[in-house]
Image (spheres, rainbow, N blue to C red):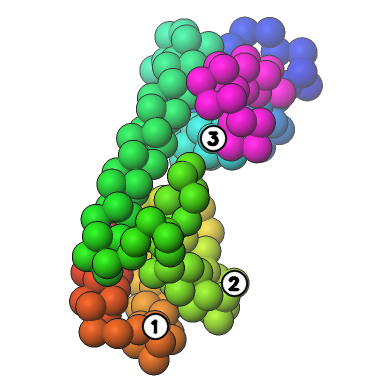
Amino acid sequence: MSVTNIHNDKQLLQLVARGDGPAFAELMERYHAPAFRVVMKLLQDRWAAEDVVQDIFLKVWLSRETLPEVENFHGWLLTLATHKVYDQVRRYQRESAHLQRWQKELNITADTAMPAGRPVSDFEELVTQAMARLSPKQQRVFTYIKKEGYSRQETAAIMNISPETVKTHLEQAMRTIRAYCLSRMDTRMVTVLIALIVRERL
C-alpha cells in the first residue's frame, strides 16, 4: 500500500520510526506547511523560517524511533517549532551581547562598528575571512558546532560522518583560523579569539 494512501498518522509515524524514507517524505508533505506558517508568523523572514523548518524535520528524523509514542503529532510538531524559534531568538540575543562585549574590549567605537541591526564586528569579519580558507567540510563542522551550537554527535549525524571525523575537521579548522587571525590581529584581539574558539563543545 502506498504511503500516500495512509490517512492515519499513527501508521505513518510507525513507518518513519522504522526508517522508511517514503513515509518520512509523506510526513513532510503533510506537515511542512503548518510548521512553516507558525515559524513564519514568529520570525517574519521567509528564508530564516525555511531554515528553521528544515532543521525541525531533521530533528524529527534523527529522533524517529520515539515517534510512535507521540499521541498528537500535529500539536507536538508545532510545539517543537515554537521552541526552536525561541531558542534561535535567545541564541541571537546572546550572540549580540557577546559582540557588544567584544566591541568594548577591542575599543571598537561607534564610528568603526557596523550599523545598528547588523551586530558584526571587525573581529567577526576576520573570522569569516579565515573560514573562507577552510575546506567545505571544515566550514560545515565549524559552523554547526561553533556558530549553531550543535554537539559533535549531532553534527556527525547531520553530515553522515563519525564523531571522530567531526573532531578532526574541527581541530583542523581552528588551527587554520588561529593561524590566519594571529597574523592579522593585535594582542587584544588574539586574547578574544582564543576565548572564542578554544572552548570546545565536544
Front tag of 2 and 1: 1
Extent of the magenta region: 29-49
Q: CA distance from mark 2 to mark 3?
A: 22 Å
Q: Which mark is residue 136?
A: 2
User: Which residue lies at the image location 49% right of the left edge and 78% below the top edge?
Assistant: 130
Q: Quadrant of the C terminus?
A: bottom left
Q: Secondary structure at mark 3?
A: helix
Residue 52, by quadrant, is: top right
Q: Which mark is residue 52?
A: 3
Q: Is there any visible trace of residue 155 in the rendered image?
A: no
Q: Above or below — where is 198 with respect to 150?
A: below
* Label 1 Cα crowd, 10 Å radius (few <14 / some 14-19 / many 20+): some
Query: In the image, what residue type sits under mark 2?
Result: Pro
User: Which residue lies at the image location 34% right of the left edge and 61% below the top edge?
Assistant: 109
Say which label, 3 or 1, has the lower sequence index.
3
Left or right: where does residue 154 sit relative to residue 60?
A: left
Nearest the viewer among 47 and 5 is 47
User: Which residue lies at the image location 30% right of the left edge and 61% below the top edge?
Assistant: 103
Q: Which residue is mark 1?
A: 181
Magenta segment's dominant SS is helix
Q: CA distance from mark 2 to mark 1?
A: 19 Å
